[in-house]
Structure formats: C-alpha cells, structure tokens
Amino acid sequence: MSKAFRFWGLFPAWALMVLTLIIPVFIVAAVSVSERGAYGGFDWGFDLTAYRQILFTLGWTDELEFDPKYLIIIGRTLAYATGVTLISLILSLPLAYWISLQSARMKLILVYLVTLPFWVSMIVRVYSWLIILGNDGLAERIYVFFGGADGQGFLFTWGAMLVGMVYSHIPLMILPVYAAVEKLDPALIEASHDLYGSRWTALRRVIIPLSAPGLIGGSILVFVPSLGAVLEPMLLGGGRQLMMGTLIQNQFGGSRDWPFGAAIAMVLLTIVVLVLIVNARRAARQMEASA
Amino acid sequence: MSRQSAIEIAGVSKQFGDFTALDHVDFKIQQNEFFTLLGPSGCGKTTLLRMIAGFETPTQGDILLNGKTISDSPAHRRKINTVFQNYALFPHMTLAQNVAFGLENLGWAKGDIKSRVDEMLEMVHMAQFARRKPDQLSGGQKQRIALARALAPKPEVLLLDEPLSALDLKLRQSMRDELRRLQRETGITFVFVTHDQEEALDMSDRIAVMGNGRVQQIGAPDEIYEAPENRFVADFIGETNFLDGEVTALDGDTATIHTALGIDVTTTQSGVTAPGPAVLSIRPEKIGLEAQAEGETREGTVVSRNYMGGFTHYTVEAGGVSLRVSRRNAQARADRIEVGDTVTLGFQPANARILGQ
Amino acid sequence: MRKQRDIRSYPGLRTLSLVFFAWLYLPIGVVIFYSFNSNRLVSVWEGFSTKWYVSALQNDALMSSVRVSLIVALFSMIFATTIALLAALVITRAPGLKMRRVSETVVNLPLLLPEIVLAVAVLILFSQVGLNSGMFRLVLAHVAFCTPFAFMPIRARLQGMSLDVEEAARDLYAPPLTVFRRVTLPMIMPGVFAGAMTAFVISMDDFITSNMLNSGGGTTLPIYIFSLIRQGTTPELNAISTLLILVSLILATIVLILNARAMRRDG
C-alpha cells in the first residue's frame, strides 16, 4: 500500500471528524464560558455565569442562593439512565441466553427479530408507545379489563418514560450480551452440574462471570445514549420532568441561553467521558490480568 | 557453472522487529528443478518463499531470477506464481475466470486466454467444472484449480506453499504423483515448501533443510538422509541414535570416535575440526539384532518393544546407553525377542556417521 | 420416550422470551392496526379503511419532508460510505500503521458521545461560520454520525476476508488498483452494501441533530412527524408511520440477509 494512499485514505475521515466533531466540541466548551447574547446566542468572552447557574440562582438582592433544581435534573437523568440500563440488563441476559440455546437456524431468525424493530425510525417507535399508553389506549383498556379505574392513560409518568427508553435502547444490550453468551461452552455448564452445582450455581458462578464482558459492554451502549435522551422525555414524559437532553435542547430553542445550554452539554460530556475512561481502565486491567 | 540458475538467494536476511526469521541465507535453485524447502514450523521457509514471491522484502541481501535481481520489483511484476496453502481461489469467480485472471492481467488476447484456460483445465482434469464456483469443489479439486491458475501464465518459477497439508492422507499421495507429473510435463522450476519430510524425500530433486533461520544442508534426498552434515539434519530427518563420544583420530573426511558404548568406530565425519567431543549418529534400521548383528557388536538388554506391523521397534540398553533399534518383520512368525532378553546388537561402521557437537 | 431434561435451560425462560418478543412487536403492530381505522379518533375502532393512506400521500408538507429526508439520506449515505471505505482500507490493510488505533477511535467517535452534545456542537459551529443552507448543514452533520455505521460492516468484511486472496491476485500480475477492483471490492461488497444501507436508514431516522439544525428548507420527515405528534395523534400519522415502518423493515431485511449470507460464505 503506497504512502500516498495511507495518507489520503485516512484524510477524509479525519477531516470530517475534526471539522464536525472535535473542533465543535471545543467551541461548545468555549461558548459555555462565554456571555449570553442580548438577543439569544452568545458573545465571546470569559464568564462562568453559565456554570454558576447550575448551582445557584440570583436572589432578589443579587445574592447567590443555592438552588438544586438543575442538580435535580442531572440526578434524575442519571437515575433514569441507570434504571433503563438495569432493566435492559435484567431482561437481556435470560433472553440472550434462551436464544443461544436454540438451533443455529432459529438463532439467526431470533437475532434478526431482536434487531428488526431497531431499524424502525426512533420517532415512530416512541410514537407507538404514545398510542398504547395514551388516553383510552391499549394499556388503559387492559388495566380497566383487569378491574382498574378508568383514567387518563399512563402518559407523562416515569413508568411511561422508562418503558419507552428501554424499548428504544434494549437491542443495544441484547446483541453484545448474546455475543458473549453464545460463545459459552456448554461443557462448562455441564461441568458445573457434574460438580454438584445447581442451576442457580451454574448461573451465578459460570454463566454470569463468563458473559460479563458482554453485560458491561451492553450496559455502556445503553447508558450513554440514555443520558442524552430527548424524544422519550419530550413525548412520553410530556416535557414536564426535564432531563439533561431536553434541558440542553430548550436552551437552543425557546430559552435561547446558549452558554447555559453549552455548559449543561459539557457536564453531560464529562459524565460520558468519565464512564468511558472507567470502562477503558477496567478493560485494560482485564487484558493485563488475562495476558 | 554453465547453466544459469533459476533462483539465486544471495545473502538474504529478514528481521521482524527483534526476531531474525532468516539469517544470511545463500543458495541457488537450478532450472527445471523440483526444489524443496524443508524444515520445522518457524524455521523461515515460508518467509523465504514469500520473499521470492514478492510479498515480503528482504532486510538484507538480494534475490535473483535468471540472474537478474527482482528484490525491488513488486509481486505483480514477477514472472513467478504461487500455489497457496489454502488455495486462495477467488470465491466470486468461476474456475475458468480464476484460471484466466493472470492471463488477463498480462494482457493476453481473448482467444489465447480461452484456449490456454481450456488447456490448463484439461491438464488438471477439471474441464467439466469450468463454470463452477470454488465453494462447490472438494479440497483436491480446489488444489488442481490452484495449480492450473498458477501454471497458466507460464511462470519461470512455481512456488508451492505446503499445498498438500490441507488434504486428507489418501489424496495427498495421489497429489504427490500429480505434482511430479506436472513438473516434468511443464519443465517449470518448482519451489516446494513443506514440513513433511516424507513428502520432501519422495518428490524432490534437491532439498534444502532449514532450521533456526539458516539453511542447514542442501542435497539430494538420499544425501540428506544418509549423509547428514550436522546434528540438526540428522535429528530432523528420520530417526536416529546419537552416541556421545570422543574423536581420537581425524583424517580429512574420516575420523575415529571412542563412543559411550565402549567401542571405537572409524567412519565418515562432518563438522569435526579437531579431536575432542563429538557424536556418532546411527539410524535404528541400520542396527542389527542377533543374527543380523554385523560389524561392531555388543551385548544389551531389551527394555521395551513396540510392534508396528511391518516393523518392530526395540529399545536396547547396552553399556549404560539406550539405543532405538528397528527390525523389519520379514517372516510372518519371526523368532520373538521379548522385553528383558539379552541380545547381541551390531552395526557396520560405514552406516554410521560422526558429527560435530 | 422419556422427557428430555436440558440442564442448560431454566424454568420460565421460554415464557419470558415469548412475552419479550410480544412486547417488542406490540407497538409496531398497534400502529399498523390503527392506521386502517376509519375513525378520526385513533384508539376507537370504527371500521377498516385505507383512506388515511390516500390522505397521507396527498399531503404536500409530508411529501416535501420526505423529499428532504431522501436527498439528505442519499448524499449522507454516499459520502459516509466512501469515507468509511477509504478509512477501513487503510486501517485494515496498511502494515505497521502507527495511527491505527487512534484513527479507528476517531472514526467511531460519534458512537461514543451522546448525540445531543454533537448536535449542539454542529449547531454552534454552523452558526459561527455562517452556514445557513439547511440541506447542506444537514448532510454535513449526518455524514459525520453515519460514517461509523458504514465503517463497522465494511471493516468487518475486510478483516474477515483472508489476505491470501489479495496476495494471489498480486501474484497473478494484478497491479494494486486491479486487485481492489476485481478482488477486494467484489468480496467486501456485502459489507459495503450493508454499511451504505445502515447509513441511509440512520440518516433517514435521525431526529435529535436534524431538530437542532431545523431551519428553512431543512424539515426532514422525522421532524415533520414530530410536529404532527405535537398536534395530537391522528390516524393519518399512523398511516405515515406504517409506511415508514415498512420501508425500514424492508431495508433491514435486505441488510440482515446480506450479512447472514456473507457470514455463511466465510464459514
């Protein structure tokens, strides 16, 4: 392979990512410490107002008052993302394991079936839950059928948001978990039984430890996008309970406070980078341990 | 030398980082020769082959084709073709397209390509499969197509990288004969790489035994087996007994060694430059037991016996030395020698060889 | 015959899995079902009708957003696939490439970060450099996050393909470009195709970035659907969604079949 091609082959990818991603992220950082513009937007400068705003509000007499409302939003976002990740994890392991027990042909079909809904437009998938969970929707009818009280549906609740977010993100969990479980040597489970272990022992001491890389990888794939979710909070959560994604979005829409939006984006980015660093370290340690 | 050598390897070394794969390798391959590079895995034989083909560049030294250096020309400009270990047939092309591929790149005329492809498929008995794709073939059939494809452009030299290793035992034997036939028919120089000594002994005009990145010995099959030049070759080709000893007299190619068996043996030597420690190499089938014990003889005790059908292998202990002895079962009910028996063993000094340490 | 007892299985596993699949397909089924409802009220079944499809197809605003989405997706697909193919070739084939790890990370960067951050980033960038053309902004941003999706299957094919075959082509007098055109490209074509399709669908489906960049002449289909949802659920929306579901499922099926076939061929 010629030197020229080595360079020109990689050049477009690098140029694209540097121009549309790396430089812009630095610009976001710069904007987050700029002043808010008089008519929206921002003016270059150095001003930590946006970050101060996360923790404090200005009182009547311009004194700083601690105000946890944005911390609550950040905390809520983390809580939802964690919840979505845990629910996906708990559902994915048995499902992936069950798929791995099927015949080769069936496995292919089932993996296809798991992946398929993921190809459907995100907005359509969220919308479908809007119909099911809405007033007089399928969920309410089932609820009433089993003796529940007729109400206004289940939209705009934490449950609706969790269901929608799990629905959107779960294939990202199932596929890596399946990849790990599928590689499990059946003889290991047989050996566990042979050595007087119960099914529960096999699960706890063999299946889970050996599929850990898939479980962790899937968790990150679900956790990171969940942190930045926008559509589910807006449509299923009704926008009443702000999340970091919607909070950022609002600053660039109606509220037009770009520096504050940029600051929240930086906080989100920092959380994600921390998660990725912790994971990279863990992976490196594991590599070392197995080497 | 009056005849131009087909391939000349001139002082070639190859480093991969800190690892020396080849260390100053020098030899010539003659025109129309079936030449084999034989050695254990990791000895550098495949690296050497890949350098001749142009897939690797020597760190040092030069490779010449018909007297002209080819070290700087890329693989696609060398009139050398390769039969790959796993055939490397193009899966998306038919067999005919596979065979035509090289000819198209050489710019042959359409009509010539067609007749050459037909001729080659005919030669490997695959004409009726021309329109098939490689994944519809058996291993042996793929092998034939790989050969036809590599021979079609009439290369100066054909390289074969362990081409028989992926075939089952029966097929391997018939492919050996087939390869010999093709080499004779085409008159092309074959350079064959293998780790299978039986294959090498059976097929080759000459063999280069490689070990530890160096050429250990080059010679005809019987030379390699009967007159190994060093311990590595004697050990790698076939089976042998090494008797430690002390060279007491040295006269050019012959020497006298006082062995651990307690007997003195005078025979041909190689690698001994001065009196001192050396080994005597004697192959198990060259040692006779009881009635067949000739030449230098000793008493010994049989400590193990392995019946192999055509042969029986014995381990005999004599004078504190363990010797492997192989005895042909020439009679259906031969007089049995059992473990624990005391036997006479012996060998002709001419069948043994003194090697430097 | 005795009942087979599989020690690898667990009680309830099958039921749980079946319930899961039902849950997975329920929403899609509901949307499709109600799209044939003649009633204007979405969740009150009245009778079978295809009239909402007719009205959807006659909706000019919808059609114009479909046009925008198709154009953006088409260009994003072409650029993303080309960039990904070039990068994958160098990354998998250049021996001793020092930038391999970091280049791979850079190409996959959009997958590592939440999309909302990237959306904000490009929005500020475009506003700074004064890039106002809606379509162009969209394509540029979409190419960035579609590239890793195109890259992954292409790189997988390139890595899965044995190098022998390329060496054999060189051995048979093919110069580098011929090796690529006649051997490498045909062999990785399923990967290239899968990558291109994925990029196309990802671009078509994008909401977060497109919404952030939404401005004159840049209303994509998901943005239009979002605005309809904001106005309340309508059967027409169901019809539009159903059409979109069908297109997605067809594309997905093509990609997955290609992948399965390629995997089988590689053994």
Image (spheres, coloured by chain):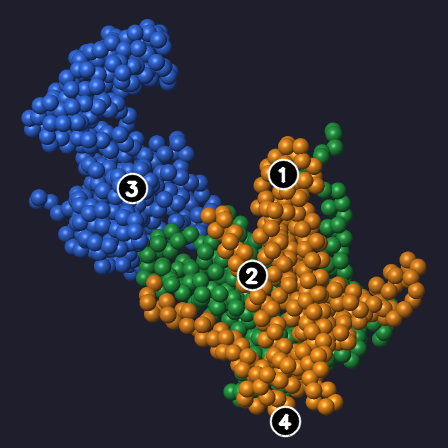
Chain colours: A orange, B blue, C green
State the separation of the CA atoms marked 2 and 4: 40 Å
Q: Amino acid at mark 3?
A: Cys
x%, y% of residue A221? 61, 61
Q: How many marks?
A: 4
Q: Residue at x 17, y 30 (%)?
A: B356
Crowding around mark 4 (Cα neighbors within 10 Å: few <14, some 14 to 19, many 20+) is: few
Q: Amino acid at mark 1?
A: Ile
Q: Is residue B354 visible?
A: yes
Asked if A1 appears above or below A234 in the picture, the reply is above
Quadrant of the image occupied by residue C211: bottom right
Q: Residue at x 65, y 86 (%)?
A: A257
Asked if C193 appears above or below B330 in the picture, the reply is below
The verdict on a common chain for dots 3 and 4 is no
Quick one: SS at disc 2? Answer: helix
Q: Nearer the viewer, mark 2 or mark 1?
A: 2
Q: Which residue is outermost to the bottom?
A: A38
**Residue named by callout 1:** A189
Tag on residue B43? 3
Q: Are marks 3 and 4 in contact (CB under 8 Å)?
A: no
Crowding around mark 2 (Cα neighbors within 10 Å: few <14, some 14 to 19, many 20+) is: few
Q: Are marks 2 and 4 in contact (CB under 8 Å)?
A: no
Say whether disc 2 or disc 1 marks the residue closer to the N-terminus: 1
Quick one: SS at disc 3? Answer: loop
Tag on residue A278? 2
